[in-house]
Image (spheres, rainbow, N blue to C red):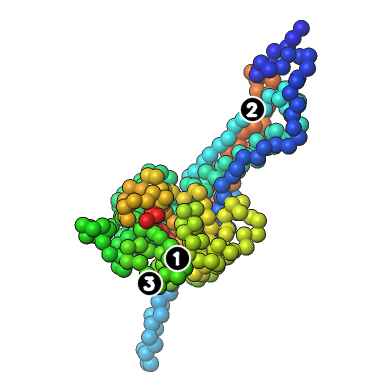
Amino acid sequence: MAIASASGGFDGNFSPIIYSKQAQIALRKAAITNAITNNSYFGDIANQGDTVRIQKEPDVTVNALQRHTGISVEKLDDSDFSLTIDKANYFAFKMDDIEEQFSNVDFTSLAADRAAYKMADAMDADCLSYMTGHTTAGAYIATASGDAQHGIALNHASVEGEYLIANHLDATDFGSLGTQDSASTAYAAGDSIPLAPRLPGATALSTATVSPLTVLARMARQMDTANVDSRGRYVVLDPVFIEMLKDEDSRVMNADFGGTGLLNGLVLNNLHGFRVYVSNNLPAKGTGAGTSGALAQDVNFGVVLAGQDDAVASAEQINKVENYRDPDSFADIVRGMHLYGRKILRPEGLVTAHYNAA
């Protein structure tokens, strides 16, 4: 008597399908959050909603000493940051007994490995959008109330734990630019930076576009002005920006990638004092940075990020991984939950730029 399987492909006599011992591994994006955030604070995370307290460095006032006068003693501020573990993702899949029997690879382990990667990828996209002040869809959070995804507001003042408006660069931050078009349309706040490489042999800077190296230099200047530590600086760029950077700077074109490629995203160890990462998880609005045409875009643009390793704290943990028998079929169910949180500690240590290919 034939035995029917859940898939309907096995008749109980023989299987004409030969399973390869090699599995096809899906293409993967680089996940870089752990490389660009401080993840040494987390301690023990048990549940969603847990809070990690991070002590702030106290500020100390230095006064001029006057002879024959007393000194003033100040009380140190012992306030702290709160990093809340408020994000949770999960996976759950079922492994049929018959599929497992006929598979020549450890299919359950493959699936679990893929699930772990996809949770890291989801965290990466969320953290990069959070660090740039954008939603994952690329919308710029320009109101004081912020948005539901981030839960905190943009601020026009230097408020700890919030974004700094002055550190979001757009076309108006580059005074060398002329007007957008023949009608002498001026650039407006929010217009993306028209980006084009300064090609070898060029004798003068363009007044219609900005070069990739100029954008990176301005990001470094913003951080220098804010006294951000030069150690541990990084920049996260998308493939369009990287391509134009290669066109402009032979150091990037000739960099020794060491065979790592997109596995960890690191493509260069030092450019303008930054470690250079490439990521497909950066937010983009509309059709993204590759949209050319008008010199400035406020509906289609890419976002790049410069930062310092201690500017943002992150904490993560796969809280539970468990398997059990499916009561309604001959199969095992494997499921897992990933908890994480992120918190901007030093907003002056994050600089973003909107741009589009001109």
Reply above or below: 305 against 323: below
Residue 66 versus residue 244 in the image, above or below? below
Local crowd at mark 1 within 10 Å, few (<14), some, or many (≥20)?
Answer: few
* Of callouts 3 and 1, the N-terminal one: 1
Q: Which residue appears at 38% of the width and 92% of the height? A: 67
* Front tag of 2 and 3: 3
Instruction: Report helix, strand or loop for mark 1.
Output: loop
Q: Which residue is label 3 attached to?
A: 204
| Number of residues whose C-alpha sits closer than 10 Å to that of mark 3, classed few (under 14), some (14–19) or many (20 or more) | few
Residue underneath mark 2 = 94
Q: Nearer the viewer, residue 78 or 200?
A: 200
| Residue 98 image offset from top left, x and y in percent | 72, 22
Where is residue 26, by image quadrant?
top right
**For this rendering, which residue is in front, 87 or 240?**
240
- Residue 140 vs 8, above or below: the answer is below
Amino acid at the residue labelled 3 = Ala
Q: What's the distance in space between the residues labelled 2 and 3, CA to CA?
A: 62 Å
Q: Amino acid at mark 2?
A: Lys
Relative depth, front residue between 123 and 187: 187
Q: Is residue 226 visible?
A: no
